[in-house]
Amino acid sequence: MSKRESTKTYLQVAGYHNDTKAFMRLYCENRISKAEADKQFNIGQKKRENGVKCSCIDCNK
């Protein structure tokens, strides 16, 4: 998995947990457009609304 793909996944997890601090950290530290970052954050929020299980390490303990 490339760094860009990893960043997109982490942005989705931030959206799933509605973690705006993690979102801004990921956006600032990585070379990704604001539009793409917002898109990935919204995908994470929609996953939560639709009842999809979270794939992050903390939720899968």
Image (cartoon, rainbow, N blue to C red):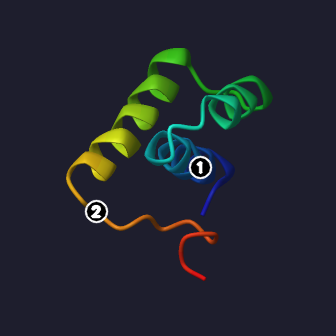
Identified at 68% across, 50% down, the residue is 3
Give the structural element (helix, strand or loop) at label 2. loop
Residue 10 location, x and y as percent? 59, 49
Residue 5 location, x and y as percent? 55, 51
Instruction: Name the outermost residue toward the left.
Output: 50
Identified at 70% across, 27% down, the residue is 31
Residue 21 location, x and y as percent? 70, 30
Say if 48 sits above or below 31 in the image: below
Q: Does 42 sit left or right of 31 as displayed?
A: left
In the image, 36 versus 11, the foreground residue is 11
Identified at 56% across, 19% down, the residue is 33
Q: Amino acid at mark 2?
A: Val
User: What residue is shown with label 2?
Assistant: 52
- Number of callouts in the render? 2
Q: Residues within 10 Å of mark 2 (few under 14, many from 20)?
A: few
Instruction: Name the outermost residue toward the right.
Output: 29
Say if 2 sits above or below 4 in the image: below
Judged by depth in the image, the label closer to the viewer, 1 or 2, is: 2
Q: Quadrant of the N terminus?
A: bottom right
Between the residue at mark 1 and the residue at mark 2, the CA separation in whole angstroms equals 16 Å
Give the structural element (helix, strand or loop) at label 1. helix
Q: Residues within 10 Å of mark 1 (few under 14, many from 20)?
A: many
In the image, 21 versus 29, the foreground residue is 21
Q: Quadrant of the C terminus?
A: bottom right
Residue 4 location, x and y as percent? 61, 45
Circle nearer the N terminus (1, 2): 1
Q: Does 21 sit left or right of 61 as displayed?
A: right
User: What residue is shown with label 1?
Assistant: 10
